Image (cartoon, grey):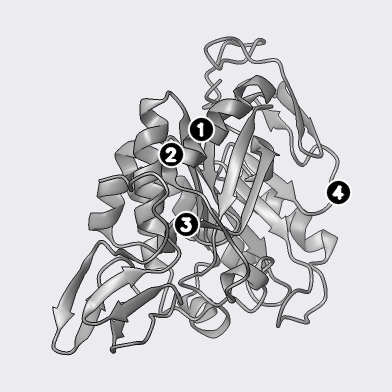
């Protein structure tokens, strides 16, 4: 049930079971078994006297009205805005994390109940807001708040958006999916060794499964950060594109340039590798975008039927030429964009 007005943190968590004196968290594939007084890998799901509780419920560390393109989502209401909310905690510990101060720490937060979040989103409608994005850190470890807020947002006619690493078990995902309108899933790499060495997870299988289960049930896009000398060679990019095309050739892929951050000191991704990666991916996928670096036309949506630019982007702005049904004005082909 949604939290009562003003209710804050330390809610009983969903998706767990007793394991002797420990509690077994069943939310994500990290499979934490947590002793009394300790937290799971995410840092926010704690064993409090034999009950799994979530200490970040309604705790908001970041809130902003963002362009939808910043998520990044290029195929969901181009040019619109979304109220973006984030909390602390993450079930990964990526060495290159861009938001490590909130994902790996416990910074100051303001209390914002689900009701307050929805009211804020409704108040922002006059500025082009279409809904709420659960983003910045990992919304999976904010599961109960996301679920409760998404129910109220859906009832208010607002959209719900996840920006996630996708590491969630199938049962909780199935509970959440009917409330989600769009998601961007960060596929770190196709190589499980990358997840183990640089992200603190056994594999990326769950992230890929999230995409496969969500495709066709909400608007889905994926992002791959090309980390220099780690996952940016042609073979790994080709494997990613092959898997994505197996989901659908219409699955949008964002290839994002890496810059040194947090514990990662490798040099920025060379531009020629980014351009080569995009070329490889476009051989299998209809919509490939380049981010975090200036590449002419790298953010444009191009009709795969006639080659016409149907959404032209500069920075986070979008100039759409799509018809009301999301079709190319040149040839009439549907370009898999929700307008």
Choose the circle earlier in sequence order: 4 or 2.
Answer: 2
Instruction: Provide the residue designation for mark 4.
Output: 294
Q: Which residue is mark 3?
A: 139
Q: Residue at x 41, y 69 (%)?
A: 55
Q: Classify mark 4: residues with Cα within 10 Å, few (<14), some (14-19) or many (20+).
A: few
Q: Quadrant of residue 81?
A: top right
Residue that carries the numbered disc 1 in the rendered image? 119
Tell me the element at label 2. Answer: helix
**Mark pair 3, 4: CA separation:** 29 Å
Query: Cβ–Cβ below 8 Å for labels 2 and 1?
Result: yes
Q: In front of the other: label 4 or label 2?
A: 2
Q: CA distance from mark 2 to mark 1?
A: 6 Å
Look at 66% across and 66% down and name the residue there. 99
- Asked if marks 3 and 1 touch (Cβ < 8 Å), the reply is no
Residue at the location (82% across, 76% down)? Answer: 267
In the image, residue 278 sits, relative to residue 82, either above or below, namely below
Image spot of residue 258 (x, y percent): 74, 65
Badge 2 local density, few (<14 within 10 Å), some, or many (20+)?
Answer: some
Position of residue 55 relative to residue 212, above or below, is below
Judge by depth and name the residue closer to the eye, 163 or 337. Answer: 163
**As drawn, is 299 to the left or to the right of 225?**
right
Mark 3 or mark 1, which is nearer to you?
A: 1
Location of residue 208 in the rendering, given as x and y in whole percent from the top left corner: 41, 58
């Amino acid at each position: 049930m949604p939290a009562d007005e003003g209710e804050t943190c330390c809610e009983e968590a969903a998706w767990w079971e007793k394991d002797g004196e420990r509690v077994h968290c069943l939310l994500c594939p990290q499979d934490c078994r947590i002793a009394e007084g300790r937290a799971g890998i995410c840092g926010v799901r704690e064993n409090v006297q034999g009950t799994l509780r979530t200490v970040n419920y309604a705790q908001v560390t970041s809130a902003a009205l963002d362009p939808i393109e910043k998520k990044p989502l290029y195929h969901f209401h181009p040019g619109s805005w979304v109220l973006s909310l984030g909390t602390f905690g993450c079930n990964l510990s990526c060495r290159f994390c861009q938001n490590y101060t909130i994902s790996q720490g416990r910074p100051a937060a303001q209390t914002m109940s689900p009701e307050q979040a929805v009211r804020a989103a409704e108040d922002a409608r006059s500025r082009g807001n279409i809904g709420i994005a659960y983003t910045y850190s990992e919304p999976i470890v904010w599961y109960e708040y996301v679920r409760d807020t998404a129910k109220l947002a859906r009832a208010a006619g607002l959209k719900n958006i996840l920006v996630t690493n996708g590491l969630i078990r199938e049962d909780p995902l199935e509970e959440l999916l009917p409330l989600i309108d769009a998601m961007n899933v960060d596929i770190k790499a196709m190589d499980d060794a990358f997840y183990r060495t640089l992200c603190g997870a056994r594999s990326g299988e769950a992230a890929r499964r999230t995409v496969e289960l969500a495709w066709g049930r909400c608007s889905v896009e994926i992002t791959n950060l090309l980390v220099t000398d780690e996952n940016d060679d042609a073979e790994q990019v080709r494997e990613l594109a092959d898997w994505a095309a197996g989901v659908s050739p219409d699955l949008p892929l964002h290839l994002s340039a890496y810059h040194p951050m947090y514990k990662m000191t490798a040099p920025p991704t060379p531009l020629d590798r980014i351009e080569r990666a995009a070329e490889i991916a476009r051989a299998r996928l209809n919509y490939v975008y380049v981010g975090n670096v200036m590449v002419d036309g790298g953010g444009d949506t191009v009709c795969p039927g006639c080659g016409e630019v149907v959404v032209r982007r500069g920075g986070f702005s979008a100039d759409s030429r799509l018809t009301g049904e999301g079709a190319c004005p040149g040839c009439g082909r549907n370009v898999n964009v929700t307008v």
